[in-house]
Amino acid sequence: MRPGAFLIEFDTLDEVMAASMGLAEQPIDEIKEMVPGARTLLVRHDPHETNPEQLLREILARSRAADSGAPGTVVEIPVVYDGEDLGDVADILECSIDEVIRRHTETLFSVAFTGFAPGFAYLASKDSTLRVPRRSSPRTVVPQGSVALAGEFTGVYPKASPGGWQLIGRTDIAMFDINREPAALLRPGMSVRFRRVENFDAKRPAQPVQKATTAPASSQWIEVVSSPLPVMAQDLGRPGLAPQGISLSGASDRSSLIAANRIVGNDRDAAALEIPPAPFTFRVKGNLVAAVTGAAEGILVRDADGDAVRLAPWTPLALNDGDTVTIEAPRRGVRSYLAIRGGFDIKPVLGSSSTDTLAQLGPAPLQVGNQVFVPERDTKIAVQPSAEPPFAMPATGETVELDVYLGPRNDWFTDEAVKFFLTQEWTVGQQSNRVGMRLAGEPLERKLRDELPSEATLSGAIQVPANGQPVLFLTDHPVTGGYPVIATLREEQLSYASQIPAGARIRFHAIETTRKGGRP
């Protein structure tokens, strides 16, 4: 993995849980974030302040014996056992349906790790009599609250989503509630017991809405006139919430977001609008100072009298009441950013105003007619004259080079496949989005055919699914994944990678973890 992160591999899930609980009891200040998986523990730290070898020794020293200590806080979850796969599970286990229910309700489960979706916890136990395979054909939609089995784990789906686990029941308990602190009901180190019920308590409140809304109105705002593609609010995301199954999210091109905020005198993490590669038009109410950065090249401003002027990005813009502004589609790059002095008045969700497209957290994409308010407050930071783009935007048809650190699972591939990964040019697919960049080329052949136990991933991780076509994870990536990661992008190139458009080609270049130089 890249500097600032490493993966500790264990032989058993019990050892992972022991290390995770040991660190919860005796935290290490140098650890920025730790994310357990089925057989691994991901540790993130400051590469400039921490010696990873020394940190590893401290982590292992804090790991308590797997069979010692009392169970963590026990959460009881009521379940109506009427799942569609309950009969199939009984057949697989060669027992009756009542016996399946008895085993499930008499077992004390531990929260091993989280991932897949916010609030989704992988629950494990020492009882091997509940192990069943995943469904051969995953469902396109699994209902919210479904209780399910797969492999050595039990889980409860926090929201409706695709899934391949065996459904045995359902609960009405909210696994994830943005109005609760913490939002995820289940976290690593806790314990769970399921209780059979015939129906649910009618007095229990309904599952909460998980959407943000704009904050109270002010007298100045922008109103969306035209937006062919989804425009979303973004800031620097939600750090430190991976134990609840929530990835960082935030702006795809963080360098452009920070630059836009600096130009208008905002704090670097103020919310701005992330604009996809299509024309975006809005109308101005009030007198505002704005900045447009990222891939944008042309900005057309038409005043209330119909007179038009073209302005440049990467410099402060004075916008007047009644102006209609069009940020034109870029010829190079993908995403542009619009910041307004004072920021946007958007109600945060879990500490951030960002829209996480995978987790479905944060405000919905803007629609025509939506008004986004700008708070009327005195901003002390001075406006900057201008800023320079940190890199040249890539374009469709061009070949770009990205630096990667091989691993942690490059040994799952043949030597020829690793060589091929680094020598062929990969084409960026049309299905790429904020979750990941889908790459097309000659498929990579795996040496190991085993199913990889779920483990934590990073932005910039290059995961290779069964079809051999890599996916480069971007900012809305899942917290954990079940396919091997052949390499991880250099952190300084994450913003650049997010601006590579469909139809461009990528060549990967392997670097050593000690290297400090590299491409933009």
Image (spheres, helix red, strand yellow):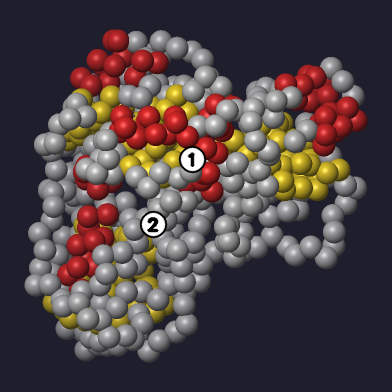
Residue name at image x 14 percent, y 65 percent: 314
Residue 24 visible in the picture = yes
Q: Give the number of marks.
A: 2
Left or right: where 275 falls relative to 79: left
Q: Provide the secondary structure element on which disc 1 rests.
A: helix
- Give the Cα distance between marks 2 and 1: 25 Å
Q: Are marks 2 and 1 in contact (CB under 8 Å)?
A: no
At label 1, counting other C-alpha atoms closer than 10 Å, the crowd grade (few under 14, some 14-19, many 20 or more) is many
Q: Nearer the viewer, residue 410 or 330?
A: 410
Q: Position of residue 387 (x, y in %)?
A: 11, 63
Which is nearer the eye, 86 or 312? Answer: 86
Q: Name the residue carrying label 1.
A: 23
Q: Secondary structure at mark 2?
A: loop
Amino acid carrying mark 1 in the image: Leu
Instruction: Pinpoint residue 103: horizontal percent, then vertical percent.
Output: 83, 29
Residue lying at 22% horizontally and 81% vertically, measured from the top left? 380
> Depth check: 1 or 439 in front?
1
Q: Is residue 141 left or right of residue 358?
A: right
Q: Amino acid at mark 2?
A: Gly
Q: Residues within 10 Å of mark 2 (few under 14, many from 20)?
A: many
* Picture residue at 54% right of the left edge, 64% below the top: 211
The residue nearer to you, when weighing 136 against 33, is: 33
Residue 400: assigned label = none
Q: Looking at the figure, which quarter contains the C terminus?
A: top left
In the picture, the disc for residue 237 is 2
Q: Is residue 412 left or right of residue 415?
A: right
